[in-house]
Image (spheres, helix red, strand yellow):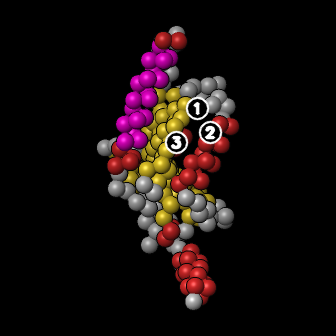
Amino acid sequence: MARRLLICLWLAFFANLAYAQQFLPPEKITYSGKTYSLAYKNSSPNGRATFEYTTNNEPIESWSSLVTLNYSKFLIAPPLEWIKVAKVALDREKPKPHYSLYIKENNGYSKIIYEPDARNPFYESDVHKSFHIETCGGILVFQFAQKYPPSADQSAEGKLSTLKKITNENSQFADEMEKSEWLPDCN
């Protein structure tokens, strides 16, 4: 009897995966008091897709704030595994960004700040929320990014002051993301 129950549970689990739907990206997303419109999308045959949203008709090449949805169909992992993979990726970055990773309820979160470098002359503040919803058949990560100009005061104190300001705003963005009721549409 126990073996039959296990087989039924196993079949039910894989049946759910077989019927998992593709993520349906919205045309518009409202975040942090602004409405963002789909400006870029890229899908690959392996089930990965990226959807980027800008506001005020900004071109994707010169955004000031950006919402990105990264979908990985068939990549099924709990939030802790997502956090572990994110940590490895962030630790490999050169220069290494300032970051924190954590889990709340069924979502993984990250708060990241990149300092300016030769390739990217701006500070960048990112917050992420990972969704691990069975009906989506994979992981979807909601990301919000904000660019900041370099500090006018290039002294150590000036840079530290800029980092503190960005860190405070990054925490506010993360709090807003945690409270957001937005969910991926995978019907």
Q: Is residue 125 left or right of residue 44?
A: left
Q: Amino acid at mark 3?
A: Leu
Secondary structure, mark 1, is: loop
Residue located at (52% from left, 58% from top) = 140
Residue 187 or 174: which is nearer the viewer?
A: 174
- Looking at the rendered image, the disc whose residue lies closer to the viewer, 2 or 3, is 3
Q: CA distance from mark 3 to mark 1?
A: 12 Å
Nearest-to-viewer mark from 3 and 1: 3
Cβ atoms at labels 2 and 3 below 8 Å apart: yes
Assess whether mark 2 and mark 1 are in contact (beta carbons under 8 angstroms).
yes
**Secondary structure beneath label 2:** helix
Name the side, left or right, on which 127 lies relative to 45.
Answer: left
User: Which residue has dot 1 on it?
Assistant: 97
Q: Which residues are magenta?
A: 158-175
Tell me whether the residue at label 3 lies in contact with that at label 1, contact meaning CB atoms closer than 8 angstroms.
Answer: no
Q: CA distance from mark 1 to mark 2?
A: 7 Å
Per the image, the residue denoted by label 2 is 90
* Residue 165 in picture, x, y percent from top left: 41, 24
How many other residues sit within 10 Å of disc 1, few (<14), some (14-19) or many (≥20)? some
Q: Which mark is residue 67?
A: none
In front: 118, or 77?
A: 77
Q: Quadrant of the C terminus?
A: bottom left
**Which one is in front, 166 or 80?**
80
Residue type highlighted by circle 2: Leu
- The residue indicated by pointer 3 is 101
Question: Relative to residue 67, is residue 76 depicted above or below?
Answer: below
Q: Earlier in the sequence, mark 1 or mark 2?
A: 2
- Residue flagged by tag 1: what amino acid is it? Pro
Q: Residue at x 58, y 85 (%)?
A: 2
Distance from disc 2 to disc 3, alpha carbons, whole Å, reads 10 Å
